Image (cartoon, rainbow, N blue to C red):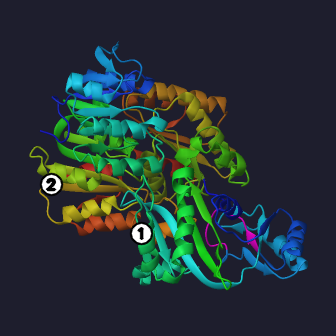
């Protein structure tokens, strides 16, 4: 078992003929992901990487029965691509694109309220992988192995770093989810933690957070209510300098939340072990 | 992009919001001329950061001589790391009351939030902490913006009913900065009500989303080059790197923001002081690595560099070869410690060792090594 994605999930790639989309679609195929098609406006009816290409997501869903999509389109078109996927009935939308304007994402979030079946991961994220079964996104499969640790993270490369350490220590992963580093995101730590909680195959959990926002605090709150998962949290950016702030508006709504200290305290209060460096994670998990 | 006050006010004026008459002055003489034209003025430092009043960056001048003296004092002053390039001389207002009005992105709600309070002025953060109920809030629908009745509710909630019409009209104008300009913060504090009942923007803060600058080339062209920023940050931006100066003496390079931030934490933990944050993004192409090293080496304070690269799909031996070439091209003599992980990391470390670059197996080991090699440890 796993969360969100397994070997039977039918996946399309939006932007499959582009450089990034093409490279990563091939990587996804090479580990056995069921890539059933892709989209590229104007190239409908052609074939790429051995799968059919469609003009729109609706056409792709109709012809292939896809339920998941990986988005690799440039920032000016990415917000529309997410909404297109949601409108076509896709239930798992993974947006890898980095640099989407925040106002575009705020409108997307509002739009998605009308399409509750669509769970969005990202944007600006490495995607997700269920080792040995399937992936959507760019997490290198060679650093993962199948097992029982759930891993959820806001940072791409730190995810790789921790996955490598877990794999080297013989601790395989059920699913690894990179939720992304943008301020306006799809699934949050809390959503993903709740999914791991319900997944019988997952027995351990690693949460890799970052300064800013208060998603880590919310996840800690959920874990504090009781969990069967042996959990370790790590927060990066504890020594990062405070941003040079302009107005008061940000401070009015966020108060003291968002610092590394506040996040670490929230996890400790919830009874979760906090690693001070990524090297400590494996030891604390055992 | 953070706009300076005078730039933000030009933008507000273009949206139809009243601003006090003002003139930009690059020299004390220009400030004196502005005062001669406008009468008593506030001489205000133009920096993209809050707290300039408390830092002595705002002075009142009743005469041209006073304006000249104030400008001479303020121009060139350092406010929170920014050298003041120019002042804005603004006609003094006849203030009857001060209101707070601000838009920003509420990360938790994943939405824009509009806030209005009758208690405007410098202490608004304290107000937020002590009596949060005195700040009225509205989350406007991002597709259609705030509706009239929503704005009316907001104004009455803030206890500003007697000003309902002019304030609601002004908020509608300010709101245009969000859909039209991709503002992530738009704040007027104080929003001044004069004794003749006019509602005028006393100050203005405007920040435009960096990710949206491609659709605001005009703003970039008009306001992008006024500030003399940190020279290394300016150079890094030209070379397409994400770089922040931090004031220490150990250069830091990582691929990915999280990994880079983690490395910064480790160097500090080992007793060193990071000179910068430099994220070279995915992969680790030789050319990008060379650019990053070049910018870091521009800073004479740097005594050594630590690099943390996660290989992933990129091969460690290729990264190592690229690194050696970059170091040789730049004739770099300072200690360089590199932590490589991922595919073929061992082969990569072997190549580094052969060329006199210290490899680190773990990031923590690399951080300790660079602190040791640079003798940078601060005994605290």
Where A54 falls versus B1 (above or below)?
above
Q: Quadrant of residue A129?
A: top left
Q: Quadrant of residue B297?
A: top right
In the picture, the disc for residue B242 is none
**Residue in the picture at 52% in, 55% down:** B178
Q: Secondary structure at mark 2?
A: loop
**Residue in the picture at 59% in, 81% down:** B98
Q: Does residue B48 show up magenta in the picture?
A: yes
Q: Does residue B345 show up magenta in the picture?
A: no
Q: Which residue is mark 1?
A: B149
Mark 1 Cα shell of 10 Å, populated few (<14), some (14-19), many (≥20): few
Between B61 and B252, the one lying in front of the other is B61
Left or right: residue B259 compared with residue B207: left
Q: Which residue is mark 2?
A: A229
Q: Position of residue B331 (x, y in %)?
A: 67, 33
**Residue in the picture at 66% in, 74% down:** B202
Chain letter of disc 2 in the image: A
Q: Quadrant of residue B313?
A: top left
Magenta stretch?
A: B43-52
Q: Secondary structure at mark 1?
A: helix
């Amino acid at each position: 078992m796993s969360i969100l994605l397994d070997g039977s999930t039918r996946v399309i790639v939006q932007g499959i003929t582009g450089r990034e989309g093409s490279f990563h679609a091939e990587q996804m195929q090479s580990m056995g992901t069921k890539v059933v098609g892709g989209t590229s406006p104007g190239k409908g009816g052609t074939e790429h990487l051995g799968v059919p290409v469609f003009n729109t997501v609706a056409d792709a869903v109709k012809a292939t029965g896809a339920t998941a999509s990986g988005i690799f389109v440039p920032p000016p078109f990415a917000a529309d691509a997410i909404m297109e996927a949601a409108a076509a009935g896709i239930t798992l939308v993974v947006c890898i694109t980095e640099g989407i304007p925040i106002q575009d994402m705020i409108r997307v979030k509002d739009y998605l309220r009308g399409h509750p079946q669509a769970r969005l991961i990202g944007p600006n994220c490495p995607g997700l992988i269920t080792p040995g079964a399937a992936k959507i996104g760019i997490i290198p499969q060679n650093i993962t192995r199948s097992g029982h640790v759930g891993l959820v993270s806001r940072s791409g490369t730190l995810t790789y770093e921790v996955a490598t350490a877990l794999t080297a220590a013989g601790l395989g992963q059920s699913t690894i989810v990179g939720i992304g580093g943008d301020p306006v995101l799809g699934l949050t730590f809390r959503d993903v933690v709740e999914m791991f909680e319900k997944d019988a195959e997952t027995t351990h959990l690693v949460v890799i957070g970052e300064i800013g926002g208060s998603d880590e605090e919310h996840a800690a709150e959920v874990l504090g209510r009781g969990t069967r998962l042996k959990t370790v949290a790590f927060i990066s950016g504890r020594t990062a300098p405070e941003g040079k702030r302009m107005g008061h508006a940000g401070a009015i709504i966020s108060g003291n939340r968002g610092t590394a200290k506040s996040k670490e305290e929230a996890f400790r209060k919830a009874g979760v072990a906090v690693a001070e460096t990524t090297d400590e994670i494996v030891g604390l998990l055992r | 992009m953070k706009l300076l006050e005078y730039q933000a006010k030009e933008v507000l004026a273009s949206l139809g919001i009243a601003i006090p008459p003002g003139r930009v002055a690059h020299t004390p003489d220009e400030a004196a001329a502005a005062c001669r034209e406008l009468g008593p003025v506030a001489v205000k430092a133009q920096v993209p950061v809050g707290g300039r009043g408390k830092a002595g960056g705002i002075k009142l001048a009743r005469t041209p001589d006073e304006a000249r003296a104030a400008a001479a004092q303020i121009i060139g002053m350092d406010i929170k790391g920014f050298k003041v390039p120019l002042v804005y001389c603004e006609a003094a207002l006849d203030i009857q009351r001060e209101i707070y009005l601000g838009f920003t992105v509420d990360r938790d709600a994943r939405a824009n939030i509009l806030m209005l309070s009758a208690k405007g002025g410098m202490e608004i953060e304290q107000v937020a902490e002590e009596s949060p109920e005195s700040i009225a809030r509205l989350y406007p629908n991002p597709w259609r913006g705030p509706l009239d009745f929503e704005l009316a509710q907001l104004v009455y909630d803030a206890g500003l009913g007697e000003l309902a019409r002019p304030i609601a009209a002004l908020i509608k104008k300010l709101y245009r900065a969000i859909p039209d300009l991709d503002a992530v913060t738009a704040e007027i504090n104080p929003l001044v009500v004069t004794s003749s009942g006019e509602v005028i923007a006393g100050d203005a803060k405007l920040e435009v989303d960096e990710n949206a600058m491609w659709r605001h080339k005009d703003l970039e062209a008009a306001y992008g080059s006024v500030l003399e920023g940190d020279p290394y940050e300016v150079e890094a931006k030209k070379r397409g790197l994400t770089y922040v100066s931090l004031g220490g003496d150990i250069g830091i390079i990582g691929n990915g923001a999280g990994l880079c931030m983690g490395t910064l934490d480790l160097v500090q933990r080992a007793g060193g002081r990071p000179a910068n944050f430099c994220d070279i993004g995915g992969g680790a192409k030789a050319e990008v690595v060379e650019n990053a090293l070049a910018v870091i080496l521009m800073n004479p304070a740097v005594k050594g560099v630590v690099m943390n690269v996660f290989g992933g799909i990129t091969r460690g031996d290729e990264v190592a070869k690229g690194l050696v070439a970059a170091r040789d091209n730049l004739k770099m003599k300072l200690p360089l410690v590199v932590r490589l992980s991922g595919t073929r990391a061992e082969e990569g470390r072997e190549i580094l060792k052969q060329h006199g670059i210290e490899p680190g197996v773990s990031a923590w080991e690399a951080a300790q090594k660079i602190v040791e090699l640079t003798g940078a440890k601060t005994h605290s």
